[in-house]
Image: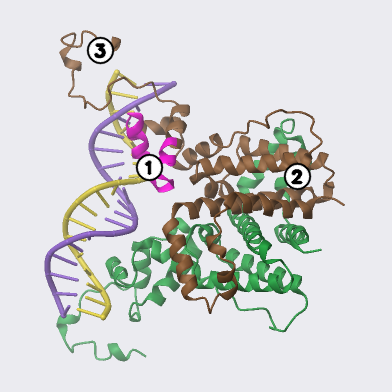
Chain colours: A green, B brown, C purple, D yellow
DNA sequence: ACCTGAACACCGTTCAAGT
DNA sequence: ACCTGAACACCGTTCAAGT
């Protein structure tokens, strides 16, 4: 069970340092992959502000500065963690579907879901360099729109519009999620000020809790606008 | 010229402390308004990471802890600075226009422009509580869409769709702006990998520099989808 | 009512060294 | 090739005081 530790009793007293009890099994060696995986864990658990080089090293059972051998700096950790979370494992069956619209919806709902699984990722994504997984998603989206007959002249506008929509929706959703109390308080304040904001008070804008449905419906409207003919 | 300093020579030696030469005129007293205004200055000049309670106090010529009398904490400073930057001074003439679509476009382009004037604001906005200026904009938008005949049942979807679009577009634009080199490098990398991303390479997705035009055209598509009939 | 300095518990990263 | 501790120049905020 502990090959490396067998005969630890007295083989060489000099190495029997008063090692803290924290880590029962010896850690695998540091690596880029382990660092990124642990960073994602930490981000999931503690949010963006929770990621600290010191805490990261702690979780990995290494000294802080050891990280810097594998990674440029903290920004680098963010970029790597972000892209690692955005891998796309295509649609259920990669058939030659004629339903381009269903494909686009699936791709973008998956994109949103991937980011919401790691709520720190959404607000980071539009502000960082585009990693390979992100570029793959854009490439696939572009392809699908192209097959659907979107004109070349409109292609970039179409892609950026969908990008904007998904990013805005997901960042907003991920943030509001973190503070249900705030939302209740906001709506309460809104009700109190209903003379100043009568229209959005009446439509209960801030109480609409069906995020998934709203996302899907709005995406439908946008695709209506984008679809040729 | 320096009324407060006249007779400084020997009035009361005890108060002649070795005061640093930095501030020629005496500062006005600390206030919430001054703090917020200076925070905006600092954010404009140095970005989100540049705003520090210590630096803020320095600029105001006060001790760090003095800020905490007027302000809860750093988060509070962010919220106040953000809302202060989003005041909406309606359209040129507040006439009873029949051109609802032009109104909506104007409102949203102004929203975008306001945020781009303070590039740190865009990525902050969707993650924070909605201040009075933001609520006013939403109220006005809701009103206009209502007059335009958008059904009550679709209202919230319409508002959030436009919100998502504007936020996504502005965050992306503000970030890419900060790093032109990155963008060039990204496109270069993309060209090098043109076999892996042929479609977006061909459409020069990352080189499209007409941000304003793309925003406007995409907004047009979205409004096409949202507009009744 | 308003302002302050000292102190605490943190940060990211450089550097010179160790193996 | 990989890891380390000490040190530097910072952070936000609590607290106990000052006026």
Disc 3 marks which residue?
Answer: B5
Label number found at residue B192: none
Front-most of A17 and A154? A154
Residue D12 versus residue A51 in the image, above or below:
above
Q: Is residue A145 left or right of residue A14?
A: right
Disc 2 marks which residue?
Answer: A204
Quarter-of-image position of residue A49: bottom left
Q: What is the magenta range?
A: B41-64
Q: Is residue B222 left or right of residue A15?
A: right
Disc 1 marks which residue?
Answer: B52
Q: Position of residue B50 (x, y in %)?
A: 38, 45
Quarter-of-image position of residue A164: bottom right
On the question of residue B75 being in view, the answer is yes
Q: Badge 2: few (under 14), some or many (20 or more) residues near its Cα, within 10 Å?
A: some
Dot 2 lies on which element?
Answer: loop
Q: Position of residue A60 (x, y in %)?
A: 36, 72
Q: Is residue A14 left or right of residue B203?
A: left
Closer to the chain start, of discs 1 and 3, is 3
């Amino acid at each position: 069970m502990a090959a490396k530790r067998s005969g630890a009793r007295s083989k060489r007293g000099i190495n029997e340092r008063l090692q803290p009890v924290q880590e029962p099994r010896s850690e695998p060696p540091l690596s880029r992959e382990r660092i990124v995986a642990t960073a994602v864990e930490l981000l999931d658990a503690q949010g963006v502000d929770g990621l600290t080089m010191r805490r990261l090293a702690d979780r990995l059972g290494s000294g802080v500065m050891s990280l810097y051998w594998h990674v440029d700096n903290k920004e680098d950790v963010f970029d790597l963690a972000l892209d690692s979370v955005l891998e796309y494992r295509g649609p259920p069956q990669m058939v030659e579907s004629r339903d381009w619209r269903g494909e686009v919806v699936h791709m973008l709902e998956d994109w949103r879901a991937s980011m919401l699984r790691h709520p720190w990722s959404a607000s980071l994504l539009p502000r960082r360099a585009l990693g390979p997984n992100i570029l793959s998603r854009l490439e696939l989206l572009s392809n699908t729109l192209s097959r659907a007959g979107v004109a070349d002249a409109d292609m970039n506008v179409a892609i950026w519009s969908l990008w904007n929509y998904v990013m805005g929706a997901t960042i907003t959703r991920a943030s509001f999620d973190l503070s249900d109390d705030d939302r209740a308080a906001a709506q309460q304040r809104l009700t109190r000020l209903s003379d100043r904001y009568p229209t959005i008070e009446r439509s209960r804008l801030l109480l609409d809790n069906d995020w998934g449905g709203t996302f899907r419906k709005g995406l439908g409207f946008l695709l209506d606008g984008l679809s040729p003919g």
